[in-house]
Image: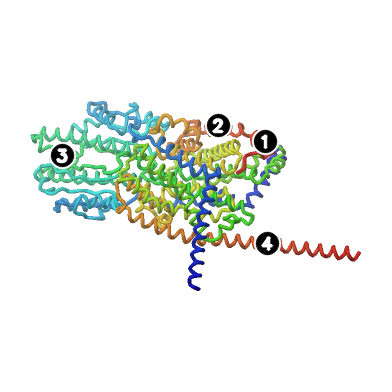
Amino acid sequence: MIKEGIIPVLKRELQRMTRRPIYLMMTLIIPAVVIIFFATFLNHGMPSGLPIAVVDFDNSSTSRLIVRQLSAGQTCEVKYKLTSYESCKTKMQTGDIYAFVIIPRNFEKDLYNHKNPTVNFHTEYAHYLPGSLIMKEINTTLSTIAAGVDLKVRLAKGQDYNAAMAQVNPIKNDTHIIGNAQLNYSFYLSSTLMPGIIFLMALICTVYAVGIEFKVGSSRRWLVTGNRNIVYSMAGKMIPYTLLFSMMVILSEIVMERIMGFPSKGNPGLLYLGALLTVVAYQAMGIFLIGILPSLRTALSIAAFYGVIGFTLAGFTYPHLAMLPAVKPYTYLYPIRQYYMIYSNVQINGLSFWETVWPFLFLLMFNFAPFFVLWNIKRTAIKLDFERD
Amino acid sequence: MNINKRIRRDLEENRKAWVDMFYILRKELYNIFTDKGTLIIFFIATLVYPLVCGYVYNKEMLRESPIAVVDNNHSVLSRQYIRMLNATPEVHVAYQCMDMTEAKHLQKTGKVHGIVNIPKEFSSDINTGRQATVNVFCDVTSFFWYRNLATATSYVSRTMGYGIEAKNLIARGATYTEAMSSIRPFIPQEQILYNIGGYPTFILPIVCIILLQQTLLLGIGILAGKSSERSRTQNITPNNIHYRGLFRIIFGRMLAVFITYIPITIYVLIVVPHYFNMPQLYSSPAEVLLFIVPFLLASILLGMTCSTFFYHRENAIPFFIFMSIPILLMTGLPWPREAMPAFWRYFSYLLPANFAANGFVRMGTMGADLAQVSKENLSLWILVAFYLVTTFFAYRWRLLSGWKRQERIDRRSRRLKSRKNRIRLNRDKQISAV
């Protein structure tokens, strides 16, 4: 059965793949470009040297100390020393700085006279990541300087250093970031976006491989090669792509683990199984789409649309918890959501197979989708009666 | 007389050029509005995608992320700490666990996104004047969980610390003002100038700009592939007397897509942000549209340059669709430009969406006026000029190769015809001989 149905179709598909360069592009070149892009683009891990400005109205030794300390941190760098609030705002609006700090007049005098002067720092969240990082950095720097002043006064009064330190800062936070110790931001982006784009290509490639048979009218020969059985014909057609795309996703995972140094706590075999099942699930969705829309171009447009929305809905750029309740059910339409679950369960939390079995079962559920449309694919393959434009 | 004649001829040629251009414009508009694939890309995608994104990215910021607390201390102070933590907008104490194993299990199964562990000696440390420690375990599956927990715990520790310090100072005989100034010699005060809305208002404008560029590239690629499929010589222009000058073709096509995109741009960049209550700090929408004109032209010309490589209508889709996410990252908004590798930074200067997204975000979210985005505006016009040149050469190459193919076909058919004639002559001769 397999020898008569699947093997001949597989051979035919391999021949077709070598004949058209677009297959080479979709299966090998684009995934390779994506892997190289993510491996090189975010290689710095955490941004540093972000430009900020300072307005020093006081110009005393303490205010100069603040300016120096702001530059000394890792995240930001004082690029401009300006003279007015307005000029800072303009610099921010022209995109030259991400934040600015204003040290008020008589700052040092007020400080020593117990008048609690205020140091305003202005940030913006139109650049979300730099904004958050700078906010955190400036806040820490200024608090440290304030604590330092407090400490100096206490030491001058004759307190013991340790006792003074404990008095200045009675509760200390010991923050553990398990698995991502340097808080590598690249990890949040690459870990699912990189495989995600390869999954998207698997979807597009499936729609293309089936649709092109309809478009050029070779679908009858395809069916005959598969012993007139649509299941065998489809299986033979899909196997090369399943293998190629799974290989590319697994390659991307190896690159993340070995070259980019992302955490890998669990069993990598489990993650590779998840990658394979997600590729198969995306192929199933591709077959479903071409089954209901046999016109290649329309199906490709819809598939692209469906696939791209997946990045928004998968929950790794924006958590599910914050989505509208009405939107949440639609996230289950995307295999990538389950892949994200598997990735975080296996690689970050180190769960075993039985503890994270649900995402795997969900991925298998997608494989029912093609069976609703296979009869339509067979009918179209024989009659070729879809609407051409 | 001679000069007059030449002027008249030039004028005539000029008039013909305009007639041809408007003919091409009309023809291309007809092509756009009768092609199903292009209509889906140009109209349905741009109509639906911003709405989907807007609804998915809820208007609210991400607040009250669930955490677990392990209280080993069970004192008034530790309970006060937990209460204060629960009162912050960032986190919500969903579970109070007996030990770390239980809490870790909750974190692994995704019930909580962070653990706070208060050690046994918490209250005794504080009461005896030692530094107390609170252990915070962050969930790294999403940046938001880390950010919320870190913000909340550092805020609570600091605030409670101030209270303790003040109490100690006053107990030792300091006055209230002295204690206050000793705790916080100066007050760092954060002011968020722009985009207090958070993540959704940050990402949506960028997505809108990228959507415009990507749909333009896709749609133009599909149209070029279609005309190349229609033509017997795989040419990108139909075999029509009006399609005879390179600039007429380029400008006619460019204007057709441009006209189609004016209402789409108004919808995506003005109506959608307004509908989702995004900040629109520019003085008038006309300013934004004025800024966006070179972006549209540059994207269209980039699309026309790329479209010369597509011989089939569906080839554009796999080629462009995977780029959307890398382009989003390369705009320098999600990931600061200062931290980009030099190669990708220079590469991003070739993308119209890069400058447009920066300019548009600064106009809408940060209230910049046209003068403050002049750098981006100038860059976009330079890109328009650059892509006009590339389009010129790309179209020239395709048209020439198409015409060459046409010539070859003509020659072959002429040869065939002559051979047929010869055969006929021979046959006639044979017949006459017989």
Q: Of callouts 3 and 4, which one flags the residue occurring earlier in the amino acid sequence?
A: 3
List the residue tagged with mark 3: B183
Q: In this view, does B374 lie to the left or right of A109?
A: right
List the residue tagged with mark 4: B410
Q: Nearer the viewer, mark 2 or mark 4?
A: 4
Q: Disc 2 and disc 3: Cα gap in Å?
A: 60 Å
Examine the image and state in which quarter residue B162 appears.
top left
Name the amino acid, label 2.
Met
Q: How crowded is mark 3: few (under 14 residues within 10 Å), some or many (20 or more)?
A: many
Q: Which residue: 17% across, 48% down?
A: A103
Q: Residues within 10 Å of mark 4 (few under 14, many from 20)?
A: few
Q: Quadrant of the C terminus of chain B?
A: bottom right
Q: Disc 1 and disc 2: Cα gap in Å?
A: 25 Å
Q: Which of marks 3 and 1 is in front?
A: 1
Q: Position of residue A78 (x, y in %)?
A: 25, 53
Chain letter belonging to callout 2: A
Q: Disc 2 and disc 4: Cα gap in Å?
A: 57 Å
Secondary structure at badge 1 equals: helix
Q: Do the residues labelled 3 and 4 touch (CB within 8 Å)?
A: no
Q: Where is residue A358 in the image (x, y as percent from the top left)?
A: 50, 30
Q: Of callouts 1 and 2, which one flags the residue occurring earlier in the amino acid sequence?
A: 2
Chain letter belonging to callout 4: B
List the residue tagged with mark 2: A365
Q: Image height check: is A208 above or below B432?
A: above
Q: Do labels 3 and 1 share a chain?
A: no
Q: Do labels 4 and 1 share a chain?
A: no
Name the amino acid, label 1.
Arg
Q: Position of residue B274 (x, y in %)?
A: 36, 39
